[in-house]
């Protein structure tokens, strides 16, 4: 049971309030939290308010759960009141009536809806309870969503609000004990997951969306078995973890680095510079906030655990006798490791010191230490977005060349090498087949794949089979912004995404891209900070957002991936016009795969209207007919028209007698 203390309404009224507060204080101490007089005073007020509210109703059989843990948020709901037909999430504040306080209460309710199995069949009502003057009752008939917009009541009005909920909620019996025993398994976003794993939790607790899907524990256990085998047999093993987009590969990698392997020396290596920057900033801020260390020490620690793979390899190549401090490294997006030509060429801004492919250098460097070593290679499907990416075949060449062994799922074997593979151990649990990023449906990735491969009928069937299909279509950028703000309820994060090759979106009103140095602020700040993603001012490209997530996303469709007579075509903008780009077609397609799979909740697809040829200043680089064809295809694939969202509910004042 996740509540610190729970009882029936009858028991709460019969029990001495001091005893209830004492039980909460004991639970607090047992969990290692320091107590305070202020906290005990707050509990005394909350218990008194609840008792007074319950006396006004036939509440003997209701259930009260106090301090209900929400691990994804690392917070607790002050109180959950389970009536015989509704779930009330109560957040108590002394005088804070701000919109932020209401969003906090609403976010708790959304968390229950998404991750607590016992909360799915009943209305969930977030209520901010404060002191002060009366605020009023809401209008009737607002139960149009599983989670109501957050209500506000003073402590004296709470009983009346409960009565209003009872009058409005549909009669559907709610078993309090069954609710308390129901599984709660949240899927945090990647920033939340990294923070939790780094601080104290394991992947077993953050395993599966919706509280009843298969968890990641099997894959995590398979990685642990491979590490133990390497340690026991003094072996060097590459562990290939494959999976569809959003299936939890990065989560498995972070759990390896911050889990049991941490004592052996472990690091998470990635060429994704924005991912490194965001996770480093998040972990350092969290460590400081928890009082673990100062900012300078926090930055030093997270830099050791999260490293840029290109810098790691170059530093070790410069010192050929250097022994790496790590025995276990996680190579993120290992299929994107550079081939020899790209490794020798380096980047536009930095000359290279590498002489082999990145997979080859990785095994040579990790093989320098005597004894055992493990490389956990995370392999994404359809994530290649740039030239010079070697793919699995290069890993298959270098593993036997350097005398290493490998573990991988059976489906990865033929991609690693043709013919016999005596160096490979097949382990089915190393393939993650169930997407867990989407909170609405596991089929989002399959729908995106069907759309991008031009299979409209397949996509339409997938969409038709999903009750609340999360992909919407609009031609208006302002409608996108309005829709994102309404979908991003509570403290959910919204943001705009675009392809780096969609150069003519500038003429449609979306010119700005988030700069590399600003990516951590874009993902970690919150509105009203204008640097935050939910300011909806600048868009992140595929390079800024790959490996990261938003709760709701607006994806701008540019002219770089359009419908032609034979299906999808790719092109790039050069000078003052478009040029066909058949050579890099799969990179452009994968760019849109990355963009379309970033959202955990709803995705709004924006296809600009384009330029009308009848206009005096017609723009030939963005013809209306091309944009219309893209929109028509997305609609044929099942994308839903973005609805005109209802205005915020009105609160009518009332007076207590």
Image: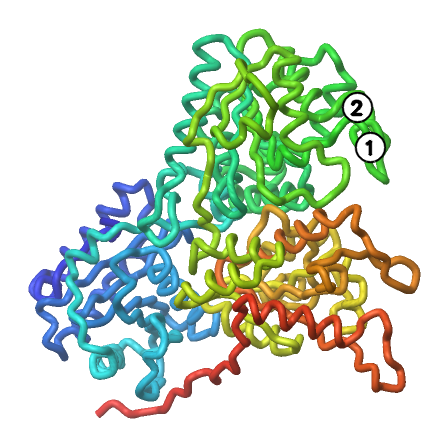
Q: In front: 578, or 474? A: 578
Q: In this view, does 241 lie above or below 570?
A: above
- Distance between the Cα atoms at labels 2 and 1? 8 Å
Q: In which quarter of the image is residue 317?
A: top right
Q: Which of marks 2 and 1 is nearer the N terminus?
A: 1
Would you say 501 lies left or right of 183 here?
Answer: right
What mark, if any, has residue 354 been given in the picture?
Answer: 2
The way the protein has been coloured in the rendering is: rainbow
Q: Residue 335 in the image: state x and y as whole percent.
A: 64, 34
**Residue closest to the eye, 458 or 23:** 458
Give the residue number, with chain letter if any, for mark 1: 346
Tell me: 450 left or right of 60. right
Q: Is residue 297 visible?
A: no
Q: How many labels does the image show?
A: 2
Instruction: Identify which residue is drawn at 67% across, 17% down.
Output: 365
- In the image, what residue occupies the spot 50% across and 22% down? 407
């Amino acid at each position: 049971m996740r509540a610190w203390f729970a009882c029936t309404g009858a028991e709460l009224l019969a029990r001495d309030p001091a005893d209830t507060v004492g039980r909460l204080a004991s639970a607090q101490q047992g969990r290692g939290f320091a107590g305070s007089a202020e906290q005990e005073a707050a509990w005394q007020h909350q218990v008194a308010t609840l008792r007074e509210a319950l006396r006004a109703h036939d509440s003997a059989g209701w259930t009260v759960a106090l301090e209900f843990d929400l691990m994804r948020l690392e917070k607790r709901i002050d109180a959950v009141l389970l009536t015989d037909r509704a779930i009330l999430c109560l957040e108590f504040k002394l005088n804070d009536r701000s919109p932020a306080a209401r969003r906090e209460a609403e976010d708790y309710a959304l968390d229950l809806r998404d991750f607590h199995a016992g909360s799915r069949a009943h209305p969930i009502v977030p209520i901010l309870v404060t002191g002060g003057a009366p605020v009023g009752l809401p209008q009737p008939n607002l139960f149009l969503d599983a989670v109501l917009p957050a209500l506000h009541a003073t402590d004296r009005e709470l009983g009346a609000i409960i009565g209003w909920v009872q009058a409005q909620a549909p009669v559907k019996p709610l078993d309090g004990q069954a609710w308390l025993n129901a599984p709660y398994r949240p899927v945090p976003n990647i920033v939340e997951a990294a923070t939790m794993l780094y601080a104290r939790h394991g992947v077993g607790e953050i395993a599966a969306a919706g509280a009843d899907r298969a968890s990641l524990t099997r894959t995590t256990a398979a990685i642990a078995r491979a590490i133990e085998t390497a340690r026991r047999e003094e072996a060097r093993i590459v562990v290939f973890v494959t999976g569809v987009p959003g299936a939890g590969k990065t989560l498995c990698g972070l759990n390896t680095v911050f889990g049991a392997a941490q004592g052996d020396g472990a690091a998470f290596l990635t060429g994704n510079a924005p991912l490194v920057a965001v996770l480093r900033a998040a972990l350092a801020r969290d460590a400081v906030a928890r009082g673990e260390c100062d900012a300078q020490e926090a930055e030093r620690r997270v830099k050791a655990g999260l490293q840029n793979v290109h810098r790691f390899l170059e530093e070790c190549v410069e010192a050929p006798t250097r022994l790496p401090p790590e025995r276990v490294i996680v190579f993120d997006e290992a299929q994107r490791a550079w081939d020899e030509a790209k490794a020798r060429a380096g980047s536009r801004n930095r000359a290279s010191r590498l002489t082999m492919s990145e997979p080859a250098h990785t095994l040579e460097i990790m093989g320098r230490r005597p004894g055992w070593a493990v490389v956990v290679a995370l392999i994404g499907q359809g994530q290649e977005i740039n030239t010079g990416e070697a793919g699995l075949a290069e890993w298959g060449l270098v593993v036997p060349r350097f005398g290493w062994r490998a573990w991988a799922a059976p489906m990865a074997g033929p991609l690693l090498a043709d013919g016999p593979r005596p160096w490979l151990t097949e382990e089915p649990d190393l393939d993650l087949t169930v997407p867990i990023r989407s909170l609405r449906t596991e089929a989002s990735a399959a729908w995106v794949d069907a759309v991008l491969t031009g299979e409209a009928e397949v996509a339409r069937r997938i969409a038709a089979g999903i009750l609340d299909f999360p992909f919407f279509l609009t031609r208006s950028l302002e409608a996108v912004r309005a829709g994102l703000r309404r979908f991003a309820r509570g403290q959910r994060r919204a943001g705009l995404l675009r392809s780096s090759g969609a150069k003519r979106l500038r003429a449609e009103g979306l010119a700005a891209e988030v700069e590399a140095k600003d990516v951590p602020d874009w993902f970690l700040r919150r509105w009203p900070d204008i640097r935050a993603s939910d300011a909806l001012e600048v868009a992140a490209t595929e390079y800024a957002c790959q490996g990261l997530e938003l709760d709701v996303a607006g994806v701008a469709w540019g002219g770089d991936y359009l419908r032609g007579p034979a299906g999808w075509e790719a092109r790039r903008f050069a000078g003052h016009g478009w040029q066909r780009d058949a050579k890099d077609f799969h990179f452009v397609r994968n760019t849109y795969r990355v963009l379309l799979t970033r959202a955990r909740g709803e995705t709004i697809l924006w296809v600009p209207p384009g330029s009308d040829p009848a206009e005096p200043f017609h723009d030939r680089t963005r013809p209306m007919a091309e944009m219309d064809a893209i929109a028509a295809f997305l609609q044929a694939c099942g994308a839903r028209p973005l609805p005109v969202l209802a205005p915020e509910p009105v609160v009518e004042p009332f007076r207590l007698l």
